[in-house]
Amino acid sequence: ISAKIVIPKAKIDGEIHKDRLLATIEGALKLSDCNIKDSPIHLMTETELDFDLAYSNGLVNIKELNVLTDGAEISITGEMLLKDSVNTNINVEGKDIDLDKFVKYVPKQTLRKIGLKKVSGEVDINGTVQGFIAGTVLPEVKMNVEINNGYIQNKGLPIIKNISFDGFLTNGKQKNNKSTSVTCKKLHAEAGQSRIDLTFNLNNLDRIHYKMNSDLEINLEDFKELIPDTIISGVKGQVSAKLSGKGILPDSLGNDFIDYLLATTELNLTVTI
């Protein structure tokens, strides 16, 4: 592990009162030329941390911790109690996180394998981390995620544009797979003259319970490259569909699940040719 560290400013005050240590630290730190074996972190140009922290008898008060790096600015405030375990009460906020700047950290062979040519969009996050960290014990995480102006270009597929997403995820009070849930309040995407609007909810990662509603407008010409001529020649027309359903995902997807999906999904379909 190696890195260039520059501390342009720092102010440290401290005192010991009986058996208590009181301290404050305020300043900034810049990281560059970072290298970790088998990690793409060397691609990062520079990361700057601005901080204002206070310490008293094991309690760290994070008045301000701002992290500015390639395409992202993240702000952290709150408290951490450092004892035999760590007790957290932290707020996290990230604004205008640029997805395009993070693609460089994905291995090139992975991008080639999935055929990803370009991805972009702005991500906003805000949430809380509350509870103990010790061994396998994790804190409760609640996070709101919003994506705007999303764009995906993939080899052999139509360009997906105007992607927007508004969602919430948490690992729940029990802080495990069973209490984990993902809620999509809104997902919108367009491809050519086609669009999809979707909402869904997933609960219990050990045995996923799902609920979804979708509204689709599909222009068949947008997907003619994906439809073999032996099936349909000269593809033209419009498909309007509304789907809704709920159920439980099986461990493996087979014919039984297709029958189950058909039985638990409501579909309204209109085809115009």
Image (tube, grey):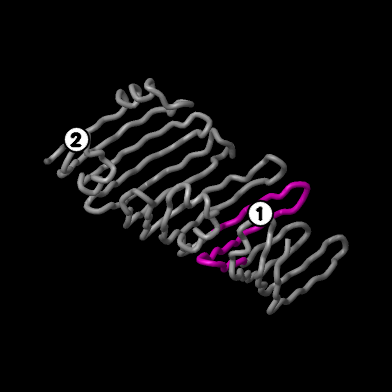
Q: Residue at x 55, y 54 (%)?
A: 107
Image x and y of residue 154, in percent: 38, 52
Image x and y of residue 15, in percent: 82, 70
- Which circle's residue, 2 or 1, is located before the other in the chain? 1
Residue 188 magenta: no
Residue 269, numbered label: 2
Q: Residue at x 22, y 39 (%)?
A: 229
Which of the two residues, 54 or 185, is positioned nearer the viewer here? Answer: 185
Above or below 49: residue 213 = above
Q: Residue at x 68, y 62 (%)?
A: 35
Which of the two residues, 79 or 248, is positioned nearer the viewer here? Answer: 248
| Secondary structure at numbered mark 1 | loop
Disc 2/disc 1 C-alpha distance (Å):
50 Å
Residue 38, numbered label: 1
Extent of the magenta region: 65-92
Which amino acid does the dot numbered 1 rest on? Answer: Asp
